[in-house]
Amino acid sequence: MSFSVTEPSGRQKLFAGVLVVVYALVTIMPLAWIIATGFKTPSDAIAYPPKVVFEPSLEGYVNLFTTRTRASAETLENLGEPQTWYDSIVRENDMVIVGPSRYGERFLNSVIIGFGSTFLSVFLGTIAAYAFSRFKVPLKDDLMFFILSTRMMPPIAVAIPIFLMYRELGLNDTHLGMILLYTAVNLSLSVWLLKGFIDEIPVEYEEAALIDGYTRFQAFYKVVLPQAATGIASTAIFCLIFAWNEYAFAVLLTSGTAQTAPPFIPTIIGVGGQDWPAVAAGATLFLLPVMVFTILLRKHLLRGITFGAVRK
């Protein structure tokens, strides 16, 4: 009977497959529940026992994007028939739409701050990582440890000093202030990840380019960057996830102009308390940009994580 120490048996493959399916179901269940809650009515969202089968409704999404007020029966009668489908949903609760909500503005703030800080983190991190990898920097190891140590501090430890500093500089509740802050926090992770990727690129490639007449910058731009594309993509995903989901600094340093979606979503209030379908709808939409960004770069992410793991 032939036996392989590397090829798993049929039973092992079946067990691994079942384990993966169970793990996938457990991890995706909270996400599926949030998405489903966004299509419930407020009464179905708080029903006990929880409703798994329900009649879908877009009330949560309507409440998310609109500001409503209670109207008397006489006022509703004078308004006539609803002009749109979302007017009909609001009228069913004896309310009228008085304007848009601020969710769109908060979502746009998240896009500007999240992607802006990610770009700066990756751009500056790539340059710093290349310098640490290729040049003889005095006290290189100590500097690398210092850069990494900034990532170890919990946000609350530096929240008050940053708040006072931003107040003096006029950076409170500004897009620039949040982009600079998230860039500073993400830069340590960016430098450490990218240095590892650049270390794996043979320096002989650059030496050959320099012999052919390339400048140092041309060798970096045309030789190193294409080789480090997987690492750059992986680093960008991790930096975006932090900036996109960050809550503590956003609550402390923003309140209106530059407020992002994470501190805004929990404040969505409906009739009689928290509007859970609107909160779930906001959370669902908030997940989409990072999900799309990760899916688009998934091949680079997988290659970036395993880059350098196997040497020939």
Image: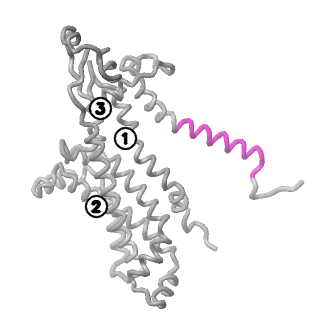
Does the segment drawn in magenta span residue 24?
Answer: yes
Name which residue lies at 41% across and 55% down. 238
Q: Position of residue 120 (x, y in %)?
A: 31, 63
Q: Is residue 36 magenta?
A: no
What percent of the width, then of the height, locates residue 22? 60, 37
Q: In the rendering, at what x and y percent does residue 57 appear?
A: 41, 22
Q: Amino acid at mark 3?
A: Phe
What residue is shown with label 2?
184
Q: What secondary structure is marked by label 2?
A: helix
- Going by the numbered disc 1, the residue's amino acid type is Phe
Q: Which mark is residue 65?
A: 3
In this rendering, the count of numbered labels is 3
Q: What amino acid is labelled 2 in the image?
A: Ala
Magenta segment: 8-27
Q: Earlier in the sequence, mark 2 or mark 3?
A: 3
| Numbered disc 1: secondary structure | helix
